[in-house]
Image (cartoon, grey):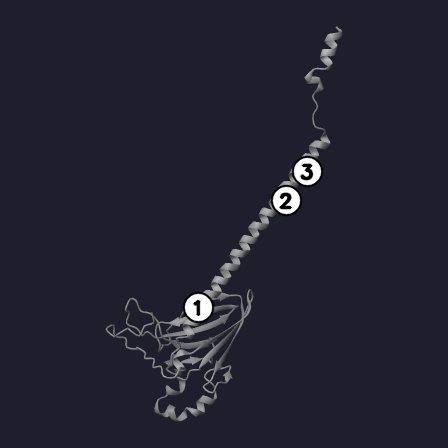
Amino acid sequence: MYFSGMHYRNSPINSAKGFTLLEVLLAIGITAMIGLGSWQILNSAIRASESTQARLKELNTLQKTMLIISKDLRQVISRSIRDGYGDYQPALTTKNSFYLLEFSRKGWRNPMDDPRSNVQRVAYELTDNKLIRHYWNVLDRSQDTESISRELLDGVNTISLRFMTEKGGWVDKWPPSESNSGAQNAQNIDPRMSVNQLPKGIEVNFDLDQFGKIKRLYEIVSNLDGIDFQTNTNTNTNTNTNTNTK
């Protein structure tokens, strides 16, 4: 009986010990802290990746917009138009109440060989902090001619323009008012001559939500001395289209 009792008291079943409630709670707390820390690290990495992708997308959109504007302004040409009321509009003007800037440009590619000019009428509009580009399928418009528009950039607070005159000065509006009186004699010969004047350069200043202030200066190539830019305004499909910009 004595040995049997001793064997019972020293048996493995009787000597096994478990975790106390405090130890279990402590283990759960440590596991929860590790899980929470891991989640915070992972969440921060995901948010940083999303923020980077969003900023890269905004930067890509800005770069595309600048490229479009650069292509437009570097191909401005001295070609006035007639509006829907038959009045002459300058080749480049800021005095249109609907648009920030309106001008004629070369280089409108015609891969389908459509019966149209390779000169395009373009306008830029700033509305609701959005920069919108307009263009028309024809140069001389009728009253029912509508533009084709495309939103280029959002988050644009302001856009200001300056134009370099032949004398090297800067003006905020184009055509400059002084050109009206100076071209009066030429207007008697051809009314388009007074509205075909181009600046030597255009300075564009942007104020953007995401990127702050950006300034770009564009030289008007068709205003350079010694360069003759011919335009093809013949709507005949057999007309030579070598003047298209590649």
Whole-percent x, y for residue 96 in the image: 46, 79
- Left-right relation of 28 to 185: right
- Quadrant location of the C terminus in the rendered image: bottom left
Q: Residue furthest right?
A: 2
- Left-right relation of 16 to 134: right
Whole-percent x, y for residue 23 in the image: 71, 32
- Label for residue 29? 3
Lower sequence index among marks 2 and 3: 3
Lower sequence index among marks 1 and 3: 3
Q: Which residue is the site of mark 2?
A: 37
Does dot 1 land on a helix, a strand or a loop? Answer: helix
Does dot 3 land on a helix, a strand or a loop? Answer: helix
Q: Amino acid at mark 3?
A: Gly
* Mark 2 → mark 1, Cα distance in angstroms: 45 Å
Residue visible at 55% across and 50% down? 46
Q: Amino acid at mark 2?
A: Gly
Does dot 2 land on a helix, a strand or a loop? Answer: helix
Q: Which residue is the site of mark 1?
A: 67
Q: Is residue 146 visible?
A: no
Q: Amino acid at mark 1?
A: Leu
Residue visible at 47% across and 89% down? 178
In the foreground, 82 or 48: 48
